[in-house]
Amino acid sequence: MPAYVSRPHTVFGDHKVTTGDIADDIRAHHPGHPRLGAILRVVRGCGVDTRHFSRPIDAPTVSGPAGIEDRAGAAFADALSMAERAATAALHASGLAGEDIDAIVTAHCTGWALPNLDVGLMDRLALRPTARHLALTTLACAGGAQALIRAADMVAARPGSKVLVVAAEVISSVYNHNDTSIESMIYKALFGDSAAATIVTGTPLGPGIAIEDSLEYVLPDSLDRYRGRIAPDGFHFDSTKKALSAADDVLPTVLDWLGPYRADFAVVHPGSPRIIQDTAAALGLDAHAARHSTATLAAEGNLGGVSVFRVLERTHDEPPADHARGVAVAYGPGFTTAALRCHWQS
């Protein structure tokens, strides 16, 4: 039986930052960088016009000199606050109270904390103490799709369950001027801070996708393609040149899994213009079909694990036809892939 996903609700960081702001900040902190001109050109061409940070760009925990303790504490506090707001909105929209929720699945990797979002939200949302809880803490950009997979598994295992799924990321925590490679400069401009929440159930609470099947895949020998690093000066996000082709390397596996299935719409992780374009093309879809991913990247940036929820939220604004066939695809570090085969339930 399908698992039904209610309309997600997304909350953004309080501070809107333009790509011009990012370029000015890079120029101010790295005036003598030997490749400054190339960096600024790439930053302006990364596909992101604006993004939201949970704190001002000149805050000590963003472009300032704060160390790991302050950055980790600020990131988790802001993630928890946004997560609570997103979850409250999702519960209200579905006509549910915290006590109605049987399980919570959270995705968060940009601030280190024990306990994590799952336990932190149980008190804030007045969930039952006996509600099942699962925190996904290392999945990054694949976290949202992976959380939906885990929620669908819970619904299948315990029919009648209502599972709250929440993702929250403060990716501005990796904005660090000690990182001076071109890749790290791109990441300064690529990411945004946000949280989103939805409810997964065995019977629909309203229109949305119905998950029919899922795929999880880890690309062999890909540990270094995207990876996180912790140092005294904060969190860092690193990648190699092989990362540029990683999505193309896993798409044949996604297509083998889909077989003859052909999608009418797609929810593609907006990791970059190339990721969106290559994934849509592999699925046999054009740029129009990927417009919600492209719009999310331009207006809000790569939101990490929250991205799939934001793209899905935009899809609700222009819903596909009833029973239209869909595919959701997200990618994460190492190189991991999470995909959903679904249809639209009006």
Image: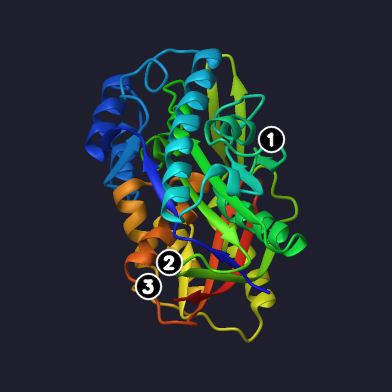
Tell me, yes or no, if residue 96 can be seen here. yes
- Compared with 313, 130 (above or below) is above
Tags 2 and 1 touching, CB below 8 Å? no
The type of residue carrying mark 2 is Gln
Distance between the alpha carbons at the discs numbered 2 and 1: 44 Å
Disc 3 crowd, CA 10 A, few/some/many (<14, 14-19, 20+): some
For label 3, the residue is 319
Disc 2 crowd, CA 10 A, few/some/many (<14, 14-19, 20+): some
Quarter of the picture holding the C terminus: bottom left
Q: Secondary structure at mark 1?
A: loop
Lower position in the chain sequence, tag 2 or tag 3: 2
Disc 1 crowd, CA 10 A, few/some/many (<14, 14-19, 20+): few
Quarter of the picture holding the N terminus: bottom right
- Compared with 134, 93 (above or below) is below
Expressed as whole percent of the image width and height from the top left, the position of residue 8 reads 45, 55
The type of residue carrying mark 3 is Pro
Is residue 85 left or right of 336 when viewed as pictured?
Answer: left
The type of residue carrying mark 1 is Pro
Q: Residue at x 35, y 54 (%)?
A: 296
Q: In this view of the protein, which residue sits in the foreground, 344 or 238?
A: 344
Expressed as whole percent of the image width and height from the top left, the position of residue 18 reads 24, 38
Q: Quadrant of residue 328?
A: bottom right
Q: Nearer the viewer, mark 2 or mark 3?
A: 3
Tags 2 and 3 touching, CB below 8 Å? no
For label 1, the residue is 129
Distance between the alpha carbons at the discs numbered 1 and 3: 36 Å
Q: In this view of the protein, which residue sits in the foreground, 7 or 73?
A: 7
Which label is found at residue 277?
2
